[in-house]
């Protein structure tokens, strides 16, 4: 019964015409494509660049330099030097001088301080004191003496003699003559003073001294070298 029913259904489906469906052509026309709507191009207006207005450059004001006053250099104060005041011009006849027997020649033994003062006004004496031996001033190495002389009439040259003596000891003041000094000196005019330095060859010693001076004002022409000094030792 079931088989018959299935067969009847199958037969019915074969006899019934196919449902008519709407037909389409094989070449179906393409659907119209929408044209893209052209967007209006917005032209950008050139943005006007702001013109940088140049600020007026302020000219620097000329600042007046302060006028500097020139510095006044202070003169250095001269150093105080112990100057020996020049000796006053001696009166004539000179005071403190020993006079010769004929009354025309005068002589005096100066002290050490007076000798320093005389060297400031007597260039010849200054040069004599500056003479050196073995790098030492002569009167700092040897026993020295000096005599100041003058004459009323003037002298063509001078001859001065003296003894170089030695004291026996610090307590015994007995003097022993070690030798003799002889010194010549150049011409001097009338009433002209001269200081004559005598330098021995005896080494400087506190017990050494020079004494027994004799000054001879000569009026003849010298037959020897002037000035000169000779020392004759007794030993």
Image (cartoon, rainbow, N blue to C red):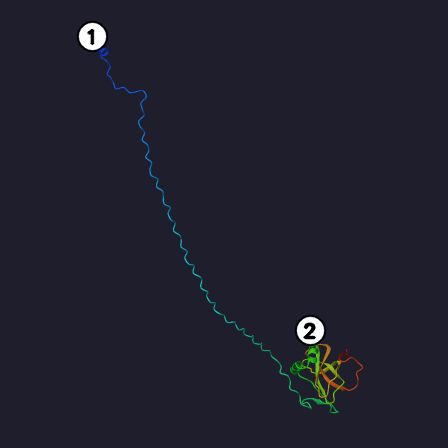
Q: Earlier in the sequence, mark 2 or mark 1?
A: 1
- Secondary element under disc 1, as helix, strand or loop, is helix
Cα distance in 3D space between marks 2 and 1: 176 Å
- Secondary element under disc 2, as helix, strand or loop, is strand
User: Where residue 106 sits: x, y (%)?
Assistant: 71, 88
Inspect this view and state whether residue 208 appears. no
Q: Tag on residue 130? A: none
Q: Quadrant of residue 169?
A: bottom right
Q: Quadrant of residue 107?
A: bottom right
Please name the residue that numbered disc 1 is placed on.
Answer: 4
Q: Quadrant of residue 182?
A: bottom right
User: Where residue 104 sits: x, y (%)?
Assistant: 73, 90
In the image, farthest residue toward the left: 1
Nearer the observer, 68 or 106: 68
Nearer the observer, 33 or 56: 33
Q: Are marks 2 and 1 in contact (CB under 8 Å)?
A: no
Q: Tag on residue 136? A: 2
Q: Is residue 77 left or right of residue 42?
A: right
Inspect this view and state whether residue 123 appears. yes
Dot 1, how many residues are within 10 Å of its Cα: few (below 14), some (14-19), or many (20+)?
A: few
In the image, farthest residue toward the right: 223
Q: Is residue 10 left or right of residue 143?
A: left
User: Where residue 214 sits: x, y (%)?
Assistant: 74, 85
**Number of callouts in the render?**
2
Dot 2, how many residues are within 10 Å of its Cα: few (below 14), some (14-19), or many (20+)?
A: few
User: Where residue 180 sits: x, y (%)?
Assistant: 76, 81
Nearer the observer, 119 or 115: 119
Nearer the observer: mark 2 or 1; the answer is 1
Where the N terminus falls, by quadrant? top left
Where the C terminus falls, by quadrant? bottom right
């Amino acid at each position: 019964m079931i088989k018959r029913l299935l067969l009847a259904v199958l037969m019915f489906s074969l006899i019934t015409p196919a449902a008519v469906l709407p037909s389409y052509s094989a070449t179906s026309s393409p659907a119209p494509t929408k044209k893209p709507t052209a967007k209006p191009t917005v032209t950008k207006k050139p943005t006007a660049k702001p013109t940088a207005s140049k600020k007026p450059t302020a000219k620097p004001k000329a600042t007046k330099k302060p006028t500097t006053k020139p510095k006044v250099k202070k003169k250095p104060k001269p150093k105080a030097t112990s100057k020996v005041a020049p000796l006053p011009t001696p009166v004539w006849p000179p005071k403190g001088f020993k006079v010769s027997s004929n009354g025309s020649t005068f002589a005096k033994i100066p002290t050490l301080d007076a000798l320093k003062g005389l060297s400031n006004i007597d260039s010849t004496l200054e040069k004599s004191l500056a003479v050196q031996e073995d790098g030492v001033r002569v009167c700092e190495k040897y026993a020295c003496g000096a005599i100041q002389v003058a004459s009323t009439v003037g002298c063509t040259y001078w001859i001065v003699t003296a003894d170089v003596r030695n004291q026996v000891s610090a307590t015994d003041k007995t003097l022993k003559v070690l030798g003799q000094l002889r010194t010549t000196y150049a011409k001097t005019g009338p009433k002209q003073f001269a200081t004559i330095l005598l330098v021995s060859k005896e080494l400087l010693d506190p017990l050494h001294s020079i004494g027994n001076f004799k000054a001879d004002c000569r009026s003849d022409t010298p037959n020897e070298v002037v000035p000169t000094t000779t020392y004759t030792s007794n030993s």
